[in-house]
Amino acid sequence: MDNNKKIYLTKEGLVELKKEYDELIGIKRPDVLARVTQARNMGDLAENAEYVASREELTFIDGRIDELEVILKQAVVIRDAKATNHAIKLGSTVTLHTDGKKEVFTVVGEWEADPTNRKISHESPLGKVLLGKKIGEKVQVEAPAGKITYSVIDVK
C-alpha cells in the first residue's frame, strides 16, 4: 500500500473503519491472543490444530490492524457533495439513465466501494468518467458486453 496516497472516505465510512479498528484492537485481538496462549499451554505445538488455527487468525488480525492504521492515517474525509454546481464529485449520489432504466449510484473512495449497495469507486471505469459531469451530460463506459452510454439525470 502506498503510504503517501490520500484515501478518500465519507464521514460514515471513516466511522465504520474506526469502529472495525477499535473492535480488532480491543476485543478480537485480545481474545485470539488468549486462545493462542491457551493452546500453547496444551503441549506439543506441531500437532495442535487449535494453536495453528489461532496463530493464523492472529496473523490475519494483525495484518488488518496494520492496514487500517495506514488507511486511517491517510484518510481524507469527503466534504458535503451538495455544495457544488451540480457537478459529480466524490460523495455525490447520481441518478443515471441507460437502456430505459434509472440507476442510482454514490461515488465514493476505493475503500468504501460496494457495488451491491450501489457505491462505486471514483477510480472505477464508471466513477472516472462521471467525475465532473453535470445533469444532461452523457458518458460512455467500456463494459464486457460492449460500450454502455449513461445520461446523467440527477446529482445530489
Image (spheres, rainbow, N blue to C red):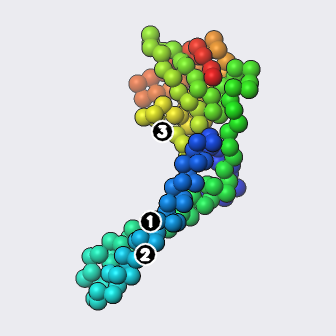
The answer to whether marks 3 and 1 mark residues whose Cβ atoms lie closer than 8 Å is no
Going by the picture, which residue comes out furthest to the front? 27
- Location of residue 106 in the rendering, given as x and y in whole percent from the top left corner: 56, 30
Picture residue at 51% right of the left edge, 66% below the top = 26
Residue 117 to residue 148: above or below: below
* Residue mark closest to the camera, 3 vs 1: 1
Q: Which residue is mark 1?
A: 28
Q: Mark 2 and mark 3: span between their CA atoms? A: 31 Å
Identify which amino acid the numbered label 1 is placed on: Lys
- Picture quadrant of residue 33: bottom left
Q: Is residue 22 visible?
A: yes
Q: Mark 1 and mark 2: span between their CA atoms? A: 8 Å
> In what quadrant of the picture does the N terminus appear?
bottom right
Q: Which residue is mark 3?
A: 114
The answer to whether marks 1 and 2 mark residues whose Cβ atoms lie closer than 8 Å is no
Q: Which mark is residue 134?
A: none
Q: Which residue is mark 2?
A: 33
- Location of residue 123 in the rendering, given as x and y in whole percent from the top left corner: 59, 38
Going by the picture, which residue comes out furthest to the bottom? 43
Picture residue at 53% right of the left edge, 63% below the top = 65
